[in-house]
Amino acid sequence: MAAPAVATPAVATPAVATPRADRPTIAEIDKRITAAARRLEVIVEQYNDSREDLRANLTRQRTLGARIGPMTRDLRQRQALMGGLAARTYQRTVRGPTAALLSADDPHEFVSKIIGLHELAAQQQQAVRDLDLARERVAHTRTTLRQLAGQQRRTQTQLSARKAMVEGEIAALKQMREVAYGAGSRYAQVFDFPAPPSVPGPAGKVVAFAFAQLGKPYSWGAAGPRSYDCSGLTLAAWDRAGVSLPHNAARQYTVTAHLDRSDIKPGDLVFFHGRISHVGIYIGRGMMIHAPEYGEDVRIAPVDLLPIHGFGRPAPSD
């Protein structure tokens, strides 16, 4: 009799990890992070640009507010002058111009009274014109102040909306970077670049300051001392040399002397992208110090890391 067949237990085959077809590669994630960082940088610089406009509006509002007081006092003085002229006219004419002329005893007195009445009338007409102009100035200034206040509120609302957009982008970038790279940086760090031994003039203070900020974190809208965004770093560096720059890369380009690449020296600024949205500090040998993007620290990098728009040199005040 044949032995009964014995079922052989199935042996589990170890699962082999295979990449999912819909999962992006590291290179693809890196490309997405770069694109997102670029969008974020544009928003940050727009935010900085709006803040510069807001500061200008606040300064103008304070200036106009300071003018309201003197203009109002001038208006009151002109109103008092009008009252005085009216009283003088009444005193000179008693019952009016006709009665004053008929009461003249001789031709000379008659002529004198005509001249006096003419002068009073001219003064009164000029006072009326001046009073109207003063009223218009006060009214126009008050209207301008109200408009500036409204514009300021709208700007603040826009800044809040942009801030929310930036924070959303920051959260997304952070999550993408953690998935792709963990907590590390996606940029190669340059550790062996020595500080220039001697940079003459104000640029020396700029370069020395930039080197002292290496390793500090990027933070949008920040200009130190603990963190920076790109234009905040260049602003703070050139402030050490006594030069005031706006907190916006594109505005910084407009207030600097433009240079050819062959003419740049340490301390000059390097601007990036066709529509400028990034800036760094040139330190020589084709390298710069810049605040790259959220999640990265102030670092040394090649100037050719990004598309170059141009070069600029701030002008120290005499």
Image (cartoon, rainbow, N blue to C red):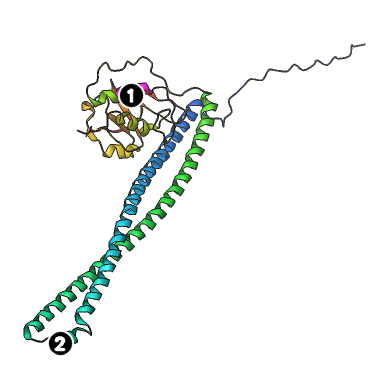
Q: Depth check: 214 or 272 in front?
A: 214
Residue at mark 2: 103
> From mark 2 to mark 1, how far is it between C-alphas?
88 Å
Mark 1 burial class by Cα count in 10 Å: few <14, some 14-19, many 20+ = some
- Residue 251 x %, y %: 31, 40
Furthest toward the right, the residue is 1
Q: Does residue 209 sit above or below 60 in this rendering? A: above
Q: What amino acid type should be assigned to the residue bearing mark 2?
A: Ser
Which secondary structure lies at badge 2? loop
Say whether residue 266 is left or right of residue 189. Answer: left
Residue 211 magenta-highlighted: yes
Residue 132 visible, this angle: no
Is 313 covered by the magenta stretch? no
Q: Judge from the rendering whether residue 30 lies leftward or rightward of residue 143; answer left or right.
A: right
Measured from the top left, where is residue 205 in percent x and y? 28, 24
Expressed as whole percent of the image width and height from the top left, the position of residue 281 reads 31, 27
Between 273 and 234, the residue placed more toward the observer is: 234
Q: Quadrant of the N terminus?
A: top right
Question: Mark 2 or 1 closer to N-term?
Answer: 2
Residue found farthest to the bottom? 102
Residue in the foreground of this view, choosing between 18 and 258: 258
| Type of the residue with mark 1 | Phe
Residue 232 visible in the picture: yes
Residue at the location (46% across, 49% down)? 157
Taking the spot 38% from the left edge, 46% from the top edge, the residue there is 54
Start and end of the magenta stretch?
206-217
- Nearer to me, 262 or 249: 249
Rendering coords of residue 276 (x, y %): 33, 38
Which element type, helix, strand or loop, lies under badge 1? helix
Query: If the image is split into quadrants, where does the C terminus sit?
Result: top left
Of circles 2 and 1, which is in front? 2
Residue that badge 1 annotates: 209
